[in-house]
Amino acid sequence: MSSQTRKALVAVIGGSGVYNIDGLENARWQTVTSSFGEPSDELLFGELDGQPLVFLPRHGRGHRLSPTTINYRANIDALKRAGVTDIISVSAVGSLKEEYAPGHFVLIDQFIDRTFAREKTFFGTGCVAHVSMAHPVSTRLMDALEASCKQLGLPYARGGTYVTMEGPQFSTQAESFLYRSWGADVIGMTNMPEAKLAREAEIPYATVAMVTDYDCWHPDHDHVTVEAVVKVLTANADNARSLVKTVAPKIYDRPLVDAQGGDHALEFALITHPEARDPEMVAKLDAVAGRVLKG
Ligand SMILES: CSC[C@H]1O[C@H](OP(=O)(O)O)[C@H](O)[C@@H]1O
Ligand SMILES: Nc1ncnc2[nH]cnc12
């Protein structure tokens, strides 16, 4: 493995309650077009302590988009086109474990994908690819998130399984009990297919999940409502902002090649014979898969 390093271009994907990054110098919203349709919003480009950062509000400014209608492919494709090398995703989640009380941060390392109404791959008929999702999160990014949580004295857990439900309705109690019986830690509606698409686009990805509620399984807590989620998000907004500002400088210097394969996931993933590839599809994949489709 090469020990060479390069400068990262870090992107933060902001979830519910996180529609902007304040304190960005030279901040400008810019349209980045994608061959996969409309991203959630323009991208916000700027610098944090002199280092470049890109921000995308997952639901769009004003929270226009539901988890199902977010164009996850366009979002990841646009970030790739902008030159992004690493993604930190920020998400509100419900807790499935007693010990993860509202206000806690869980650094996710696994996902269960229960979504069923979303485009989940950049590939398909005309150019088939199968990437590994065994380890969906970059340990390097998680290390940086953990160091930042420690530095800021935030209550956090390293490692946790995030169940992605389709939504937009919250879970029934039977579903919530089921996910708990699977040993899952938190629940949300957005991180899949986002993490799968980041992997296909060869962008290392990590999620910091901010617990906002106990979903609906806990006998001593009210069932989740948007009002309760927003209240906890507002109370913890400063922590989320500080976390983003603290973590970015820690990942600015990155290895040329991510040790876990997050940035060379397509190396052995394409199976369609070059002569059988659909040229239109190959053209659409110029940003996501140009590295392996060329030549
Ligand atoms: C407003 S509560 C439900 C909403 O919040 C989470 O979104 P995000 O991951 O973007 O913070 C959850 O997944 C739902 O989309
Ligand atoms: N309980 C919950 N279920 C799904 N998504 C959530 N986002 C925040 N809390 C949630």
Image: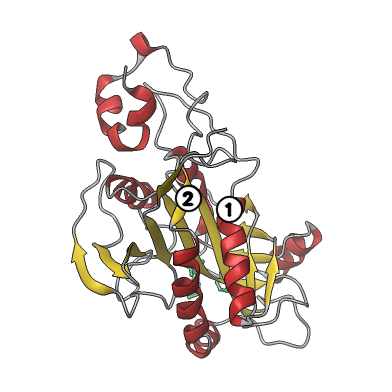
At 38% from the left edge and 64% from the top edge, which residue is drawn?
A: 58
Closer mark to the observer between disc 1 and disc 2 = 2
> CB at mark 1 closer than 8 A to ligand 1?
no
Q: Which residue is mark 2?
A: 254
At 30% from the left edge and 68% from the top edge, which residue is drawn?
A: 47
Q: Amino acid at mark 1?
A: Arg
Q: Nearer the viewer, residue 130 or 236?
A: 236
Query: Do the numbered discs 1 and 2 sit on residues whose CB atoms are within 8 Å?
Result: yes
Determine whether, in the image, residue 145 is placed left or right of residue 90: right
At 33% from the left edge and 51% from the top edge, which residue is drawn?
A: 79
Q: Which quadrant does the N terminus fall into?
A: top right
The secondary structure type at the circle numbered 1 is helix
Q: Is residue 284 above or below residue 50?
A: above
Q: Is residue 228 visible?
A: yes
Residue located farthest toward the front when viewing the structure as drawn? 4
Q: Residues within 10 Å of mark 2 (few under 14, many from 20)?
A: some
Picture quadrant of residue 288: top left
Q: Nearer the viewer, residue 123 or 177?
A: 123
Residue 246 x %, y %: 49, 73
Q: Is residue 274 above or below residue 160?
A: above
Residue 55 marker: none
Q: Which quadrant does the C terminus fall into?
A: top left
At 59% from the left edge and 47% from the top edge, which residue is drawn?
A: 136
Q: Nearer the viewer, residue 164 or 24?
A: 24
Determine whether, in the image, residue 180 is placed left or right of residue 291: right
The secondary structure type at the circle numbered 2 is strand
Q: Which residue is mark 1?
A: 140
Chosen colour scheme: secondary structure
Q: Amino acid at mark 2?
A: Arg
